[in-house]
Amino acid sequence: MQFYLNGYQIGDPEIHAPAAGFERPANDLPEAVDVLIVGTGPAGLVLAAQLSTCPGFTTRVVERRAGPLELGHADGVACRTVEMFEAFGLSSRLLREACWISETVFWRPDEQDRSRIRRTGRIDDAAGELSEMPHVIVNQARLQQYLLEYMEKSPTRLRPDYGLEAVSVQVADTGDYPVTVTLRPTGGGATQTIRAKYVVGTDGARSAVRTSIGRELQGDVANHAWGVMDILAVTDFPDIRIKSAIQSANEGNILLIPREGGYLVRLYVDLGVVDPGRRDEIRNTPAERLIEVAQKVLHPYTLDVKDIIWCSVYEVGQRVTDKFDDVPADRVATQLPRVFIAGDACHTHSAKAGQGMNVSMQDTFNLGWKLAAVLQGRAAPTLLHTYSAERQPVAKELIDFDKEWSAIMGSPPKDPLHPERGGVDPAELQEYFEKSGRYTAGLATRYPSGPLIGTAEHQALAEGFTIGARFHSAPVIRIADAKPLHLAHVHRADGAWRLYAFADASAERLHALLGWLAESSSSPIRRFTPADADPDSVIDVRAIYQQGHREIEVDALPSLLLPRKGRFGLIDYEKAFSPDPRSGMDIFDQRGIDRAQGALVVVRPDQYVAHVLPLDAREALEDFFGRFLLDARP
């Protein structure tokens, strides 16, 4: 973490000084804003947190509830989401409070007595090589509180306006603020309107924003019901603190998730096939019935529930909209998007795979930096078309995965004495968990080649940084202070692109690249960085040498790796790195970097690898950024 760039500040360094001329917004909404976010779920707050650091334009957030969420329903936080929270500087807090899911155990009917269950398998929940971050469990309300506090500490001191729900959204063809949103107090009262340049609907599965732009959730109901409850209980079940997939012979299945705090447990309880004529009855299943089913599934172990924190019954269904913005598919070439939807507003599915909250936050992590770049004048508004183009296929993949996941989790175990009855072999269930590990960790997303993703002709230079996938971190040592850290942890949620330049054997190509980036009139840094901005504010260059950190003198580093920043022109010493021998593997070997030629890895603000290029591919680098960034030179 870096601070004091523009002067010493007393107190918590995470509390940013207010932006110049800043005044906390009044309780009353203004007539017009640049961005209006509708909804304060995880998707809405990830977007708000990003935009809260941008004082150059106005952002407001409205929420129909009277205040912050107190008891959240989602709880699973995938490895990829923890990586994202690191970019906000929030991962250490999350990891300290959360329950870590390290393993999954499997229980099936005992072959000798099928009325009893026994443990039959155990796997790592998220293999260590997938991510340096674990899969964790924490209440959605706590996770949202982290983001709310981040917003409060930001230069804009952004906070939601509670007690307001969106009624309708209308988009005009012209005007600086073409979107008009009608809001209604949830406690009753007169409606009011607010105009905006852009509106983002993160207002849930019954989204008024989605309805207003004519999008519909399309999909199927699986006619299978599950109950879910968070409980405090006394039990002799030995794996109560380990994620467990439990199949009983005749009573249904359970997915058991230990919760944060050491005592709380979540049970997903299989309630079986839903008779369409009895839907309301199933949805009103009392908690006592869920407990009764859970007790039968866990036999011969006992379950004495002392307290129920939360309980619900849901029917499995998978739905997704065909597009995530207001532009009809046949008008993309002539019309710019003004209204976007994210999270449950555009995709819904079952809860057991733990993907809903995670995919929703990745939606707006994708959108946030794009909105900021456009509003700050750094990118053309056509950039905003890439949000729906990239995220809708990801949601479609999620729906397809969730159908498989829900089907296998809701199937009874095969009875070896009666194979004609069908079901899922318990070994097959365990195998499926293992195969789906990358997906459930949130690491399966790969964006195809397009405006923001390059082609793969130079992928062999850095095989471990897959173009279109998230940047896979590895240990390094920072040269200036010998600090060991993960390379991806230098990435902040600040809207900047990263260029990770891995040195060639002699470092000659590296230094030639750095010299060109610093001095040439055709350098993307000089071309796209405003004259009054810090040199790394748009494109942030980091270099990774092959030599050990003690073999490189800091004062001999190229000037681009010692940039002067802030009002005092202070030197940033945190741009150059070496492999960390103490980690047991050199990053060049670990990520398949060509040692002879080196490699340039271009990483987007949302941590996805956009391109891999040779160190001397200057024209290709300039052309790539020229696709979407606007020239900042006079």
Image: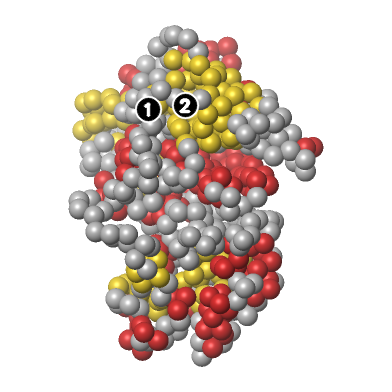
Which residue in the structure is indicated by mark 2? 30
Residue closest to the eye, 212 or 318? 212
Which quadrant holds residue 626? bottom right
Rendered location of residue 70, percent (x, y) = 31, 28
Tag 1: amino acid:
Ala
Residue closest to the eye, 244 or 583? 583
Mark 2 residue crowding within 10 angstroms, few (<14) / some (14–19) / many (20+): few
Mark 2 near mark 1, Cβ–Cβ under 8 Å?
A: yes
How far apart marks 2 and 1 lie (CA) works out to 8 Å
630 sits to left or right of 348: right
Residue closest to the eye, 33 or 460? 33
* Residue depicted at 45% across the width and 46% down the height: 54
Rendered location of residue 344, percent (x, y) = 53, 32
Q: Is residue 563 visible?
A: yes
Which residue in the structure is indicated by mark 1? 26
Tag 2: amino acid:
Pro
* Residue depicted at 37% across the width and 27% down the height: 26
Viewport quadrant of the N terminus: bottom left
Rendered location of residue 575, percent (x, y) = 41, 72
Instruction: Assign a secondary structure to mark 1.
Output: loop
* Residue depicted at 69% across the width and 56% down the height: 450
Residue sitting at the far right: 330
